Image (cartoon, grey):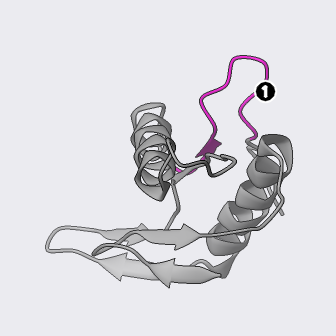
Amino acid sequence: MVARYGGEEFVVLMQTCSLTNALRIAELMRAAIERLSIERFTLNSVELIIASIGCAVCIPTQDRAAKHLLIEADKNMYMAKSLGKNRAYCGKTDLVEVRNENAE
């Protein structure tokens, strides 16, 4: 399920998805958005629309509510932005950030 979450933010909910697969899917989405080459006009420039994606997974329990999942994904999205934007990031040290500089 894909839903708008904020002004420029969306959430993608996937059932039974590992963090590794979530990161791969996020990178596919990021690359597809980049390939669209949609221009955004500002007062002083023209920029291509890109996506910075934060991934998170959880197994719901009574103690671990959905808000924890959103907080983790949001934190990882801001980390993706701080690392240079236009990337998918999951925040786990054992999973390398997925980013293809020449995505086609």
Residue under label 1: 95
Please provide percent x and percent y for residue 88.
Answer: 63, 47
Residue at x 51% of width, y 64% of height: 50
Residue at x 47% of width, y 52% of height: 65
**Of helix, strand and loop, which one carries label 1?**
loop
Given residues 89 and 15, the one toward you in this image is 15
Please provide percent x and percent y for residue 19.
Answer: 77, 43
- Can you tell which quarter of the image residue 67 is in? bottom left
User: Is 43 left or right of 84, judged from the image as shown?
Assistant: left
Q: Which residues are magenta?
A: 86-98
Residue at x 34% of width, y 72% of height: 8
Please provide percent x and percent y for residue 90.
Answer: 63, 37
Asked if the stretch drawn in magenta spans residue 93, the answer is yes
Disc count in the image? 1
Amino acid at dot 1: Leu
Q: Main secondary structure of the magenta part?
A: loop
Q: Quadrant of the N terminus?
A: bottom right
- Can you tell which quarter of the image residue 43 is in? bottom left
User: Is 6 left or right of 10, judged from the image as shown?
Assistant: left
Asked if the stretch drawn in magenta spans residue 69, the answer is no
User: Is 86 left or right of 78, judged from the image as shown?
Assistant: right
Asked if residue 12 can be seen in this view, the reply is yes
Q: Residues within 10 Å of mark 1 (few under 14, many from 20)?
A: few
- Can you tell which quarter of the image residue 9 is in? bottom left
